[in-house]
Image (cartoon, rainbow, N blue to C red):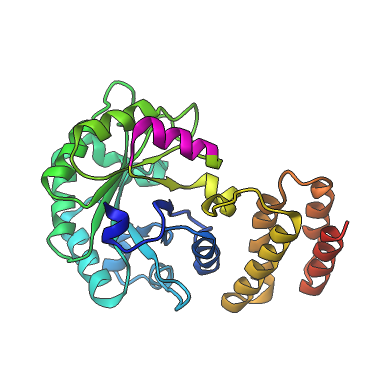
Amino acid sequence: MIKEKLNLNSNLFLAPLAGVTDIPFRIICGELGAGLCFTEMISAKALYYNDKKTKKLLDTDPRENNTSVQIFGHEPEIIAYATRFLTENYNFKSIDINMGCPAPKIFKNGDGSALMGDLNLAEDVIRACKNNTDLPVSVKFRLGIDENSMNYMQLGQICERLKVDYITLHARTRKMFYSGEADWSHIKRLVENVDIPVFGNGDCFTKEDIRKNMEYSNCDGVLLARGAMQNPFIFSDDEIKTKEEVIDTIKKHMQLKLEFYEEKRAILEMRKHIQWYLKGFKNSNRVKNEINQLTDIDQIYKILDEFKNE
């Protein structure tokens, strides 16, 4: 079981999310109970060309002890280089290969879910990664490019043959992007047909969603993306939090942001998180609108404290 192999406290993982899974958010999710937290998705080619912005995304903090990295690319030699670079220069728990990203720019370049259109190349990419690290390697992929080419089972079996440590299936096709419903029957089928750990991904927004889908599919864990982005408390034992606990977490998150970014950027980036944190609380729209107009940290804390005491 991958949870034990990586010495993790949970089989609920935080997915890579561009513009979201930075150090402060990873610290928050780790403290709330996430077993593994991913950096933002990393371009293997950008590492090859020594891109400073990309390398900045690889920064970690001593308060993290459960961070992994996900790379994307379609050229085996570039993947091999990136894998060696990450293994030799960082202290990540594992390396994940993205074969599921549906974004047009990624797909057009032959990366992400485009690799599901060429399983021979996908196999070469996985082998290049496996052969250049002693870290656990995982692969994330979708059902296929569209409903007429669902080849997730074949890719899962390739991963099994190459001794990948675990795989994650997002139960949608590339064509679906994030629309429609994730079909967990395919995750169940994959679990039944491969002899490596399978994580499920797609439409888990509550603890009940997680419980229901894990029980149905018998998967080994869940990779949480939008569900965690909108509600990091999903990682905790008790998903339902009081307004006081949520606001205290917002303030802690803000303080972490201020450690890593200048104040203006920290405030701007926290606006989206505050929108998500306060969702569902009475009168929260008023508070969110007020905060969106503010650029002074003390004023923001004042509004939050007043709301906490209402």
**Residue 235 appears in the figure:** yes
**Residue 222 sits in quarter:** top left
Q: Position of residue 140 (x, y in %)?
A: 31, 46
Work out whether 46 lies above or below 3. below
- Pick whichever, 61 or 113, lies toward us: 61
**How many numbered marks are there?**
0
**Residue 108 appears in the figure:** no
Q: Position of residue 29 (x, y in %)?
A: 52, 60
**Residue 207 sits in quarter:** top right
**Residue 303 sits in quarter:** bottom right
* Left or right of 12 on screen, residue 190: left
Q: Position of residue 123 (x, y in %)?
A: 15, 45
* Left or right of 230 on screen, residue 133: left
Q: Residue furthest top?
A: 148
Q: Is residue 91 magenta?
A: no
Q: Position of residue 67 (x, y in %)?
A: 39, 65
- Pick whichever, 105 or 243, lies toward us: 243
Main secondary structure along the magenta-highlighted residues: helix
- Which region of the structure is painted magenta? 208-219
Residue found at x 40% / y 71%: 65
Work out whether 50 lies above or below 14. below
Residue found at x 13% / y 40%: 120
Looking at the rendered image, the quarter that the C terminus falls into is: bottom right
Residue found at x 69% / y 71%: 264
Q: Is residue 210 magenta?
A: yes
Work out whether 77 lies above or below 180. below
